[in-house]
């Protein structure tokens, strides 16, 4: 697995947020876990474009940043559930505002993003 050799720049709030939320699926994972989709298979169904491996890596990083917690039940086969921590719940309103901004500017954003593929 990739190990970072250069320490991240953590001098301002944007650097800190970027370090914690950098990853294509992290905001969606947090949002879906908040909505009650806690099992890895449920999250995979909600984000079918992501591979299981990538989701597992990003879930692990969210857990390391103490935004989510992982609960493993002692049953066969093992049952795993993810829950937002109190710290993770503080991000939900921020993600909601970002999502609302995206919806308000949907046409413009789609236009500028699709220019790359023309």
Image (cartoon, grey):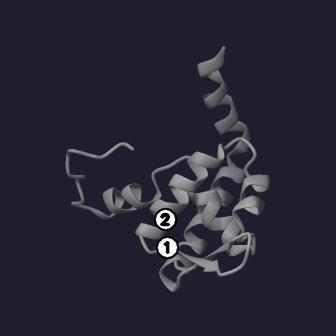
Asked whether disc 1 touches disc 2, contact meaning CB atoms under 8 Å apart, the reply is yes
How far apart in space, not on screen, are marks 1 and 2 (Cα)?
A: 5 Å
Q: Residues within 10 Å of mark 1 (few under 14, many from 20)?
A: many
The dot on residue 62 is 2
Residue 67 versus residue 11 in the image, above or below: below
Where, by quadrant of the figure, is residue 28 drawn? bottom right
Q: Residue 58 location in percent, x, y?
A: 52, 55
Q: Residue at the location (66% across, 25% down)? A: 114
The dot on residue 67 is 1
Q: Residue at the location (59% across, 65% down)? A: 95
Q: Residue at the location (60% across, 79% down)? A: 71
Q: Residue 83 location in percent, x, y?
A: 62, 78
The dot on residue 77 is none
Q: Observer-nearest residue: 19 or 55?
A: 55
Position of the N terminus, as image quadrant, is top left
Residue furthest top in the image: 118
């Amino acid at each position: 697995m990739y190990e970072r050799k250069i320490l991240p720049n953590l001098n301002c709030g944007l650097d800190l947020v970027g370090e914690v939320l950098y990853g294509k699926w992290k905001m969606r994972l947090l949002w879906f876990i908040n909505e009650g989709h806690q099992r890895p298979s449920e999250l995979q169904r909600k984000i079918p474009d992501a591979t299981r491996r990538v989701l597992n890596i990003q879930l692990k990083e969210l857990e390391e940043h103490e935004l989510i917690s992982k609960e493993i039940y002692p049953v066969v086969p093992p049952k795993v559930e993810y829950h937002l921590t109190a710290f993770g719940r503080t991000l939900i309103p921020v993600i909601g505002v970002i999502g609302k901004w995206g919806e308000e500017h949907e046409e413009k954003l789609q236009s500028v993003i699709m220019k790359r593929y023309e």
